[in-house]
Amino acid sequence: MPSLSSYKNLHKRYSYFFLIAGIIFVAFNLRPAITSVGPLIPIIRESTGMSNSMAGTLTTIPLLSFAVFSLVAPKLGLRFGNHLSIFCALLILGAGILIRSSGVITAIFIGTALVGVGIAICNVLLPGVVKFSFPKKVGLMTSLYTACMGIFASIGSGVSIPLYETFGLGWEQALGVWAVLTVLALFVWLPQIIGTKETKKPVKEDKPGFSQSIWSSSLAWQVTLFMGLQSFLFYSLITWIPDVLVELGMSLSLAGWMLFLLQLVGIPFSFAAPIIADKLNNQKPIVIAICSLYFLGFTGLIFNPNVAVITISVLFLGTAQGGAISLALTLLSLRAANARHASLLSGMAQSFGYLLAAAGPVFMGFLYDTFHTWKPFLFVLSGIAVFILWFGLKAAEDKFVLPE
């Protein structure tokens, strides 16, 4: 007969299998509820009678929710356990998607805010789950879930219009369909909250002010600014790059495909960067490679904007962005001595980071309104890449934000 140790080993394998599956399905839900909105904004605006500025806030509200609830999420993880908190966050996300798809203007904004709350909590707590459950495979697991995020971010932006036009769904149903993915994630994540030690015995803080000490760490600020500035750059790009490319002579439809390419090309590199980062003593070579691609991409758009160069530049920028976001998420685990520190660092970096991200598209729109050309946009983002390089090199040093 099989020994007791054999049963324990088999149970452990199944537990890891369900946890990995759960992380993947949670990652599937972290972007499409947001990226699916952009292509539908003109239709939503026409259907509801919203003003341009009001419709534009549909992409800003989730980022502001990220900023606020990224600070709250570590406390929820400490109080209730990361697994249970993520399950509740998925419930909030699903409820937000359904409320938003009602078509009532007030409900649209309430639902959009709830979508941001649910995603923010999952964003912050997943690095802690990875650090705790896979301490020797942080790079691989971060690669896995960031690649899943990237794939469904692209799918979210790519299928919205086909769902609306080809399948004859209204914009409400085209947005509401993502609730199905959330329900699937709830079922796959369910084993993590049944009989697990973490959720039966919630972690409590060891001493007063512990969660505040992360804010006094210079390394934590360097990680935070790396996260924030690459988010600023990314959301500025995906908001305005079609307009930039139209000014450079592209048709609107081709510029739209360039936006899709920008997100799609980064997926392989979002998978590779964490694996490479986990094998290095420090991650400075990756930071240098990412920022070199940023500089090449912006240089091509500024100085030689023909179709071939624009396409190559977009490939460079997409590759850089795919590596930047996955490296930023990996640093949240690599610069933390344990799972608790990882969650605290994740909360700090993503809160401040998404505040910067929310400001990016607005500030870049202001630049265009002021100068009536997108050239300043390209020069400013080139400057942002310099700061990403500076703070990235500091954040890549082989140290912990807090002592173990």
Image: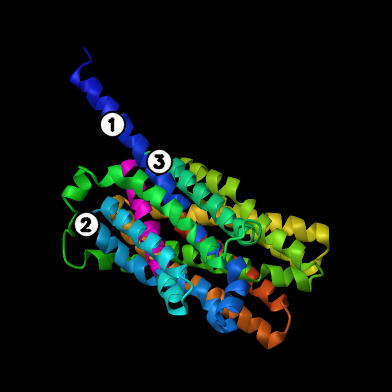
The location of residue 209, given as percent across then percent down, is 21, 68
Q: Residues within 10 Å of mark 1 (few under 14, many from 20)?
A: few
In space, the residues marked 2 and 3 are separated at their CA atoms by 22 Å
Q: Is residue 362 magenta?
A: no
The location of residue 369, given as percent across then percent down, is 67, 86
Q: Which residue is mark 2?
A: 80
Q: Which residue is mark 3?
A: 21
**Amino acid type of the residue tagged 1 in the rendering:** Lys
Vertically, is 222 above or below 339? below
Q: Secondary structure at mark 2?
A: helix
Which disc, if any, is residue 268? Answer: none
Which residue is rendered at x = 58% and y = 76% of the image?
47
Which callout, 2 or 3, points at the residue further toward the start of the chain? 3
In space, the residues marked 1 and 3 are separated at their CA atoms by 14 Å
Looking at the image, residue 4 sits to the left or right of residue 341; the answer is: left
**Amino acid type of the residue tagged 2 in the rendering:** Phe
